[in-house]
Amino acid sequence: MAEVKHEIDFVEVKAEDIVGDRTHGWHLFTKATTWTIVAVGVLLVFLKTCAG
């Protein structure tokens, strides 16, 4: 059976990197949530006007 050699380079993880990643993720989450709420609102208004 063939042997697979793996080489992993470990890089120091700094607190600023972790905070930056979480902040970026939080901004993406809040933007997606805002647009989802707006889309649902528009859909409800559209359904109310069409279906009465």
Image: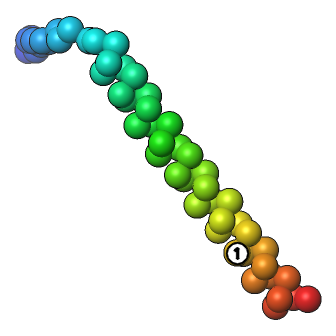
- Scheme of image coloration: rainbow
- The residue drawn where x is 73% and y is 69% is 41
Q: Quadrant of residue 43?
A: bottom right
Depth order, front residue of 25/4 = 25
In this figure, what is the number of numbered marks?
1
Does residue 1 show up? Answer: no
Image coordinates of residue 40 in percent, x first then y, are: 71, 66
Q: Quadrant of residue 25?
A: top left
Image coordinates of residue 8 in percent, x first then y, are: 14, 12
Image coordinates of residue 27 in percent, x first then y, are: 48, 42
On screen, residue 32 versus residue 49, left or right, reads left
On screen, residue 25 versus residue 18, left or right, reads right
Three-letter code, disc 1: Val
Which residue bears the numbered disc 1? 42
- The residue drawn where x is 12% and y is 12% is 9
- The residue drawn where x is 50% and y is 37% is 26
On screen, residue 12 versus residue 52, left or right, reads left
